[in-house]
Image (cartoon, rainbow, N blue to C red):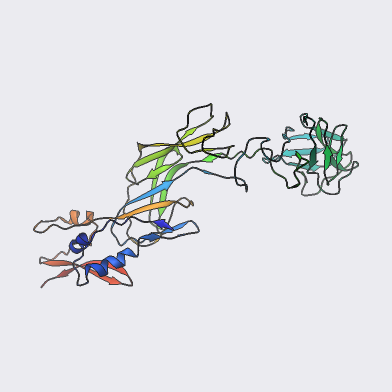
Amino acid sequence: MLNQLNTTTKRELDEKYFSGESVEEIENKLQGSKQITNTSGTLSIPDYGMTESIELYFKPTQDLHGYDKPWSGGTEKNKLNPSIPSQTISGITVTKNDDGSYLCTGTATADILLQFDTFNTSGESYILSGCPPTGSYSTYCLGVVDHGTDYGTGLTFSDSGKPYIRIANGYECPSGGLLFKPMIRLASVSDATFEPYANICPIIGQDKASLTWNTNQGISMNFGTTYYGGIANFEGILSLDWQRIASYDGETLPGEWLSDRDEYASGTTPTTGAEVVYKTTPSSVRVTKPANNVLTDDYPITYNGYKLDVTYQPKDTILEESKTYTNQEIAKLGLPQAPTSNGTYNLVCTVASGVPTLSWESTT
């Protein structure tokens, strides 16, 4: 549930709505619009034709690839650096995936042995796993040079050596490919579920803010560059409170931060070389103001597919007594078009199904 700011006071309601209803009755109906529901990325904002401004709060985001945090290489369960590059060798195409798994396709025309960098056990016991089921030395397997093989059930070893992927001469990979998920974990860790060696999660910023409240109406504000967090107020001003460091090198961070390879905790710092964004004192940037910044109806409002906090503030329209208003001023105040015939008129508020509507009513 998102908060909506409604600054209308009882005195202003008295001056704004010349109606037979009491101030309390009108205010109670407006009170019902103070909460904005968020369903499947859609923000529904009751407008009542009096919108002054919309502010969008945006923050840096990350795709965590299905995990609960990013991490640097070897700092979590999987200690095996996937150092074998993508390549084609002896009839087999080996593709290294982003998570450190390997997809093999084709038919081997010779025995293939692809070796990872030497793994140093420091005398501790580890388990190598990740060979597809039902492997064999005559088809495919994982192993550690001079220390044994894994045919799909895991290999426990304690001496340093070079892990490898082996595909035997003449073996034809399945039509969908043969997927290896090589992982080395401490023998004390019972969970054999594959995890990447590193979970690098680039930080996502925004280069525009756009609102759509039906199929034909919308606001779009291009920033001209990518920013990572702040407030876009659709008046051409961004108040930015997140800044980015492309490669962290020990800079002092004033508070909360996000890293593409570290989980934030108070008092800690990111890994050197990490992409980092950090919370800082807000600074203002002027960008191109959209041509249309007035919402006119109660329609669902979406923002770039993201769920964001929205501050919505109705316009305070107070008519001064004994003052002459031009048609342009009436329109600017967000009021209905003024009557064209001479006469004296009251501005009347009628409410149907909880929705106030303004109109002009002749006193004669």
- Residue 337 in view: no
* Front residue of 108 and 29: 29
- Residue 259 in view: yes
Point 48% across, 41% down: residue: 205
Residue 242, percent from left and from top: 44, 38
On screen, residue 291 above or below 271? below
On screen, residue 95 above or below 219? above
- Residue farthest left in this picture: 322
Residue 183: which quarter of the image? top right
* Front residue of 296 and 251: 251
Taking 97 as reference, is 126 left or right?
right
Residue 357: which quarter of the image? bottom left
Residue 294, percent from left and from top: 31, 54
On screen, residue 363 above or below 56? below
Taking 56 as reference, is 159 left or right?
right
* Front residue of 76 and 98: 76
Residue 141, percent from left and from top: 85, 41
On screen, residue 316 above or below 96? below
Look at the image and tell me in which quarter the C terminus lies.
bottom left
Look at the image and tell me in which quarter the N terminus lies.
bottom left
Taking 322 as reference, is 188 left or right?
right
Residue 19, percent from left and from top: 20, 69
